[in-house]
């Protein structure tokens, strides 16, 4: 496990980031999009970590650190123009190094997002055994997955957007995955307050790939309480039920008539305490939803979330076939976030665009195999606005 050598003063993010000084009823002034860079500390081996701030020129401001490609803060205005940070995160690099193997706040997840049963899969006749870091299963690429890597960063800027291109090469055998995987993740913030995330990967040997971002959202503002009043719509008429270890059973079950039916808007907390076997297993929602795509690989609206008090709206579109909806069930009050407030159960939700969990062991699920000469290419778009 990496340890911290130093933390710079600029690495400490306190409650000053939570709400910006925009007068009530006023919209943030429209300016050209911008990007800036500052140091965020260093690891024990001397590897420096930077933080980039991207501004849309309208209302959204995003801070991304090169450790884990983590979205540390994301500020967006409410219906009165008041900005607040709406993602959960930590104030210092030390917090991420020590704790990101738990909540994975805002991180790039790979090589394989979500769970693989017993950490084992067979590809082209060879069986690979991964580290077990979630009970008897492997989770989110293992204990030294992409969320623990320092990514090479290159800022991008044009008239209508700013971006950050992050690159990392995962060596053959890293975390016991086969093949040298060259990965590029590009965050782009546009003048219409969309954060676009593009994932691109190639390999020199057959391997498995499933990449996502693990941001937790609270549209009322990070550290303000639970997300149970947020109204969620999911473009998914089926989901993948799980066993006691949260591994899919292989069934693609209809959501109709269950607490998993978000095809029409429902408050997240409306049915979260219903005596449903799947909710009992996950201690809430922690399930993959099968998205109703127009066609495979097409950018399709997958989710819409509205926070009624602030009016903030999050719309997510993706080319991925699935989305893991997680209602923050295991936030347990043992650490505090960027606001200095303690995170407790239900204080944030994640909507992780992805291929399905355990796909390498589920022949009826969409394949996650990547071979030499092929390109993994995936896009997810987070759109931010406010209902009047």
Image (cartoon, helix red, strand yellow):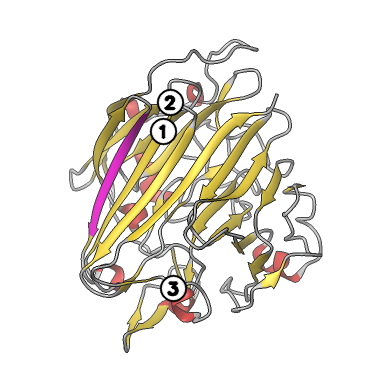
Magenta span: chief secondary structure: strand
Tags 1 and 2 touching, CB below 8 Å? yes
Query: Can residue 87 be seen at all in this image of the molecule?
Result: no
- Going by the picture, which residue comes out furthest to the left? 46
**Residue at the spot of label 3:** 367
Pinpoint residue 103: horizontal percent, then vertical percent: 49, 52
Does residue 98 appear in the picture of this structure?
Answer: yes
What residue is shown at x 31% (from left), y 85% (from top)?
A: 124
Which quadrant of the rendered structure holds the N terminus?
bottom left
The local secondary structure at tag 1 comes to strand
Mark-to-mark CA distance, 1 and 3: 30 Å
The secondary element bearing badge 2 is classed as loop
Q: Determine whether, in the image, residue 240 is placed left or right of residue 172.
A: right
**Residue pictured at 34% horizontal, 39% vertical:** 65
Q: Say what secondary structure mark 3 lies in.
A: loop
Q: Which residues are magenta?
A: 161-169
> Residue 320 vs residue 246: left or right?
left
Q: Earlier in the sequence, mark 2 or mark 3?
A: 2
Q: Which mark is residue 227?
A: none
Q: Mark 2 and mark 3: span between their CA atoms?
A: 36 Å
């Amino acid at each position: 496990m990496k340890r911290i050598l130093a933390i710079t003063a600029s690495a400490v993010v306190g409650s000053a980031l939570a709400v910006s000084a925009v007068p009530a009823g006023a919209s943030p002034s429209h300016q050209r999009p911008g990007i800036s860079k500052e140091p965020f500390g260093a690891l024990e081996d001397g590897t420096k970590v930077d933080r980039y701030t991207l501004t849309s020129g309208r209302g959204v401001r995003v801070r991304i650190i090169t450790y884990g490609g983590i979205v540390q803060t994301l500020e967006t205005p409410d219906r009165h123009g008041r900005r607040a940070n709406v993602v959960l995160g930590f104030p210092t690099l030390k917090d991420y190094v020590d704790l990101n193997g738990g909540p994975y706040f805002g991180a790039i997840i790979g090589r394989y997002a979500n769970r693989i049963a017993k950490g084992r899969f067979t590809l082209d006749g060879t069986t690979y055994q991964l580290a077990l870091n979630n009970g008897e299963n492997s989770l989110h690429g293992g204990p030294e997955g992409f969320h623990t890597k320092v990514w090479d960063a290159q800022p991008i800027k044009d008239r209508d957007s700013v971006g950050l291109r992050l690159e990392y090469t995962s060596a053959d055998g890293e975390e016991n995955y086969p093949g040298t995987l060259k990965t590029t993740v590009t965050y782009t913030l546009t003048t219409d307050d969309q954060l676009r995330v593009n994932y691109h990967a190639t390999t020199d040997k057959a391997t498995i790939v499933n990449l996502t971002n693990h941001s937790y959202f609270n549209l009322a503002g990070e550290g303000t309480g639970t997300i149970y009043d947020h109204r969620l719509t999911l473009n998914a008429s089926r989901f993948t039920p799980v066993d006691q270890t949260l591994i899919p059973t292989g069934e693609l079950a209809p959501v109709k008539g269950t607490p998993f039916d978000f095809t029409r808007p429902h408050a997240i907390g409306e049915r979260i305490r219903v005596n449903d076997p799947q909710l009992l297993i996950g201690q809430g929602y922690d399930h993959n939803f099968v998205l109703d795509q127009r066609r495979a690989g097409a950018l399709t609206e997958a989710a819409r979330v509205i926070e009624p008090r602030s009016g903030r709206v999050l719309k997510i579109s993706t080319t991925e076939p699935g989305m893991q909806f997680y209602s923050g069930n295991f936030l347990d009050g043992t650490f505090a976030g960027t606001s200095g407030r303690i995170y407790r159960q239900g204080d944030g939700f994640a909507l992780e665009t992805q291929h399905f969990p355990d796909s390498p062991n589920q022949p009826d699920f969409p394949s996650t195999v990547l071979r030499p000469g092929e390109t993994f290419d995936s896009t997810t778009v987070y759109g931010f606005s406010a209902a009047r």
